[in-house]
């Protein structure tokens, strides 16, 4: 762009302007180019002044213009729904279609491509007529957001709901559930390919254009690309011969015509069942080929369990916490950190590199625990904070802090430093002057106790924090502890985490506040210093006994310290005054599993309560066992027998068998959860499937642990519905202790009316309106059990059912039952 007449019109409208050279870069935090976009070029006005041409509109030639534009529009879409508080207007992170994430689940999916906003909705077929041509609430909210920020939008691209549309070169038909190439492109490339095959000679450019169009068509059925092989060699031969025209080989004509004959296959059918074999192809001149999967990876098993995007809320990655730890010990060596050997290596160039790498940081935490040997009052040979070669390293803390504040100028920087409380007054004064902060002491309430003031950070407390520099406030009792982690080497650790509760806990932990604080961190629900659950698939194949606990409660609390005492309301949802019984049931199931080395313990129960959010019943019981260390069975069978005997003394057990040898896999490595069951029948059925997923085969023996009044439901109705032999089925009934608040008579009456009579007439719970509605009400998040993928039809082949001489199952109600079970 020059300074001639071509710039007159855009300058008159205020879109572009000239900025003189001396006004471009300022020293008083004024944005570069005064809020305009531009590229530094040599432009001169008529009077000889050097200027820069800048634009209010982001030009496509601007550096990173594509990523900046997409980032702006994506953030507008994310904030549009939150601004108006309407669930239908919301565009959550977990529902976004992205190439760097797995495909999400949900009835409403969205994506941003440059400045395009695409919304994909799944609706009932009966609603399509009324919704056709209307505008979705999310689109209306986004348009309103554009008006708030005075951002124009293209009227031609602003369309309403439609069952058929064109998106990025593809025609998507919502009625048929298919996607195929655009008709105009299909006709163009088809005609060009036929014309090319009729030519005796052609150029390299002609072959590249035609083959590029054929690859575009083959994108809708990837296997079709395997038909193009010789054409790539022919295109490469032009580089070797240097000729502009070459004779068309007959094998290339054959490949092109063959692919044209496969055009009816070039379509994606979104309503087809997923094939268990995953394939991918590679077209290259050095080999290429097609590969097919032969087994399921650990990540694939997680997907088969239903751990897919779209079901749980995701944290937005825009706001990150950057943690810099000086003099950290081995406890701060998290995966992915950047480590330096010497604190002197933290230079201005190094911090500048961090500022460009971690540009999304919204908060920087600097934690330091300098060596304290030279200032400790317990050291008779101490030399002081300034003379000791190790303790004098504290002077690097303010230096690094100032570098972080200078180069991370867009976010606040906070500093934590700890040392021993027994230092002399002179050393404390020297450190205080250097760091620019007064020390605060954290002393235990009694000798030998932990320091007070270090508390668990709940999400509610985190939301009340104000991270602005003027309002940031820490409790005086949380600044220092008395001991420090041993650190022989000087290290610097740096990493990123999302700015939520777990992030803040991990971030402060990285500051190396001392052994007392680390011991307190080990009690947090989302952090543990050791997690020795190393599952051995080969050893698990020898398991044959299923120990099932059918859950009916969900733990809401982040900490389990008060669950047993019920000191706070709302900690547990669904126990119905059965706290003691449920705790004993959990302990008994672990004892039974520990007594049988061939047993696999399964806590079963899905996300059945909308008020509890996406929390599983099965995982809640697993947390109880983990928190109270129920499966710490490292002793002998006599010790387990003693514990089982103690349990028998506190609760009456029906059907508790004798203990066995404890030789084998620890109980913690033989405990899993089943997270999709909605009622007692699914507890048993889905646990069979979960057992097969983990072990590789179905169980030979089953033990169910539940309330005593549910014995007939499990041992007779559900067991017989699954055709499982009674001789290999056991039931352990837990009875409420005398004097408890549990209303046993009322529970038995409800069991008869709401369960036994219904399952007697409808064993699979598929036809009774009450049972069907109960399952729907217990599935507020619309989850689907994935066991058909992992167990498939082998579930019915020779285990629960037997085939007759005609090859048919002896009872044909299974297929219908599976449909109503969403299985």
Image (tube, rainbow, N blue to C red):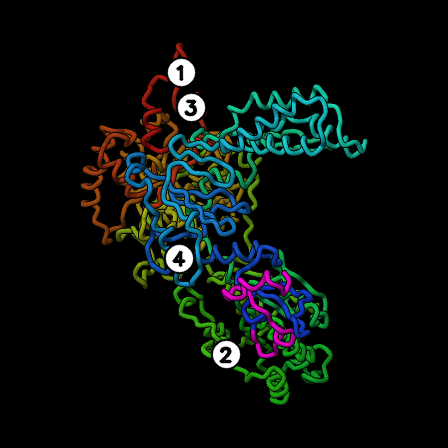
Label 3 neighbour load within 10 Å: few <14, some 14-19, many 20+: some
**As drawn, 87 above or below 674:** below
Residue 24 on image: x %, y %: 62, 73
- In front: 586, or 427? 427
Q: Residues within 10 Å of mark 4 (few under 14, many from 20)?
A: many
> Considering the numbered disc 3 on the image, is that residue within a helix, a strand or a loop?
loop
For residue 259, above or below residue 360: above
Q: Are marks 2 and 3 in contact (CB under 8 Å)?
A: no
Tell me residue 611's x, y (percent): 31, 53
- Within the image, what quadrant is residue 489 found in? bottom right
Does the magenta portion include 24? yes
Return the residue at label 1.
803
* Residue 799 marker: 3
Residue segment shown in magenta: 1-30
Q: CA distance from mark 4 to mark 3?
A: 53 Å
Element at badge 4?
helix
Report, in whole angstroms, how far the alpha carbon at label 4 lies from the one at label 1. 58 Å
Dot 2 or dot 4: first in sequence order is 4
C-alpha span from label 2 to label 3: 64 Å
Q: CA distance from mark 2 to mark 4?
A: 48 Å
Which residue is rendered at x = 44% and y = 46% of the image? Answer: 118
Q: Dot 2: what SS?
A: loop
Residue 393 lies, in percent from the top left, at: 69, 77
Choose between 261 and 24: the one closer to the eye.
24
Residue behind mark 2: 443
Going 62% across and 56% down the picture, which residue do you hit?
Answer: 336
Q: Nearer the viewer, mark 4 or mark 3?
A: 4
In 3D space, how far apart are the residues under numbered discs 2 and 1 (Cα atoms)?
Answer: 74 Å
Q: Quadrant of the C terminus?
A: top left
| Residue at image mark 4 | 80
């Amino acid at each position: 762009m020059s300074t001639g007449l071509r710039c007159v019109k855009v300058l008159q409208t205020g879109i572009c302007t000239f900025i003189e050279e001396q006004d471009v870069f300022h020293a008083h935090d004024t944005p570069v180019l005064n809020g305009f976009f531009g590229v530094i070029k040599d432009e001169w006005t008529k009077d000889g002044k050097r200027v820069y041409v800048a634009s209010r509109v982001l030009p496509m030639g601007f550096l990173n213009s594509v990523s900046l534009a997409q980032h702006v529009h994506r953030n507008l879409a994310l904030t549009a729904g939150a601004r108006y508080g309407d669930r239908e207007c919301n565009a959550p992170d977990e529902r976004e279609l992205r190439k760097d994430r797995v495909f999400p689940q949900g009835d409403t999916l969205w994506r941003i491509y440059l400045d395009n906003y695409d919304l994909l909705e799944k609706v009932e077929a009966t609603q399509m007529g009324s919704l056709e041509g209307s505008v979705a609430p999310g689109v209306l909210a986004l348009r309103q957001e554009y008006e708030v920020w005075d951002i124009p939008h293209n009227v031609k691209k602003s369309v309403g709901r439609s069952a058929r549309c064109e998106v990025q070169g593809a025609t998507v038909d919502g009625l048929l559930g298919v996607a195929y190439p655009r008709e105009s492109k299909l006709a163009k490339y088809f005609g060009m390919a036929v014309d090319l095959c009729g030519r005796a000679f052609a150029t390299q450019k002609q072959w590249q254009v035609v083959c590029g169009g054929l690859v575009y068509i083959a994108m809708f059925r990837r296997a079709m690309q395997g038909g193009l092989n010789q054409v790539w060699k022919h295109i490469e031969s032009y580089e070797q011969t240097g000729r502009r025209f070459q004779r068309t080989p007959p094998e290339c004509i054959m490949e092109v015509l063959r692919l044209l004959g496969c055009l009816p296959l070039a379509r994606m059918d979104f309503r087809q069942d997923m094939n268990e074999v995953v394939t991918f192809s590679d077209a290259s001149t050095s080999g290429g080929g097609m590969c097919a999967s032969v087994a399921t990876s650990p990540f694939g098993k997680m997907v088969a369990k239903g751990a897919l995007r779209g079901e749980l809320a995701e944290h937005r990655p825009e706001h990150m916490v950057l943690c810099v730890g000086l003099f950290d010990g081995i406890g701060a060596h998290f995966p992915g950190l950047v480590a330096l050997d010497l604190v002197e290596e933290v230079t201005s160039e190094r911090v500048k590199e961090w500022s460009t790498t971690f540009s999304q940081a919204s908060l920087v935490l600097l934690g330091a625990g300098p060596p304290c040997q030279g200032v400790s009052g317990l050291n008779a040979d101490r030399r002081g904070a300034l003379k000791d070669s190790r303790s004098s390293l504290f002077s690097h803390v303010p230096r690094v802090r100032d570098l972080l504040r200078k180069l991370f100028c867009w976010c606040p920087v906070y500093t934590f430093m700890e040392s021993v409380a027994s230092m002399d007054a002179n050393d404390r004064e020297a450190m205080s002057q250097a760091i620019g902060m007064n020390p605060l002491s954290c002393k235990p309430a009694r000798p030998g106790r932990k320091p007070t003031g270090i508390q668990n950070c709940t999400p509610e407390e985190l939301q009340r924090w104000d991270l602005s520099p003027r309002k940031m406030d820490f409790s005086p009792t949380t600044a220092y502890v008395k001991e420090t982690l041993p650190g022989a080497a000087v290290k610097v650790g740096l990493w990123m985490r999302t700015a939520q509760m777990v992030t803040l806990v991990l971030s402060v932990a990285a500051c190396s506040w001392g052994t007392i604080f680390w011991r307190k961190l080990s009690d947090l629900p989302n952090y543990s210093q050791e997690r020795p659950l190393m599952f051995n698939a080969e050893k698990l194949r020898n398991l044959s006994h299923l120990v099932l606990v059918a859950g009916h409660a969900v733990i809401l609390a982040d900490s389990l310290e008060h669950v047993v005492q019920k000191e706070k309301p709302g900690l547990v949802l669904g126990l119905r005054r059965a706290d003691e019984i449920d705790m004993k049931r959990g302990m008994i199931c672990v004892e039974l599993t520990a007594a049988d080395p061939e047993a696999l313990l399964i806590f079963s129960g899905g996300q059945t309560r909308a008020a509890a959010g996406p929390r599983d019943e099965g995982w809640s019981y697993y947390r109880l066992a983990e928190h109270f260390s129920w499966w710490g069975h490292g002793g002998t069978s006599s010790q387990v027998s003693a514990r089982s005997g103690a349990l028998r003394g506190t609760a009456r057990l029906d059907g508790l068998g004798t203990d066995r040898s404890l030789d084998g896999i620890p109980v913690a490595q033989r405990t899993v959860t089943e997270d999709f069951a909605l009622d007692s029948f699914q507890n048993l059925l889905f646990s069979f499937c979960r057992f097969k997923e983990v072990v590789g085969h179905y169980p030979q023996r089953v033990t169910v642990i539940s309330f005593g009044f549910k014995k007939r439901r499990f041992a007779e109705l559900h067991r017989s519905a699954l055709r499982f032999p009674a001789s290999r089925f056991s039931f352990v009934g837990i009875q409420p202790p005398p004097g408890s608040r549990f209303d046993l008579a009322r529970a038995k009456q409800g069991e008869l009316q709401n369960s036994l009579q219904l399952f007697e007439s409808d064993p699979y719970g598929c036809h009774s309106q009450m049972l069907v509605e109960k399952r729907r009400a217990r599935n507020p998040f619309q989850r689907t059990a994935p066991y058909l993928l992992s167990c498939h039809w082998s579930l019915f082949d020779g285990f629960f059912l037997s085939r007759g001489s005609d090859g048919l199952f002896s009872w044909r109600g299974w297929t219908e039952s599976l449909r109503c079970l969403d299985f």
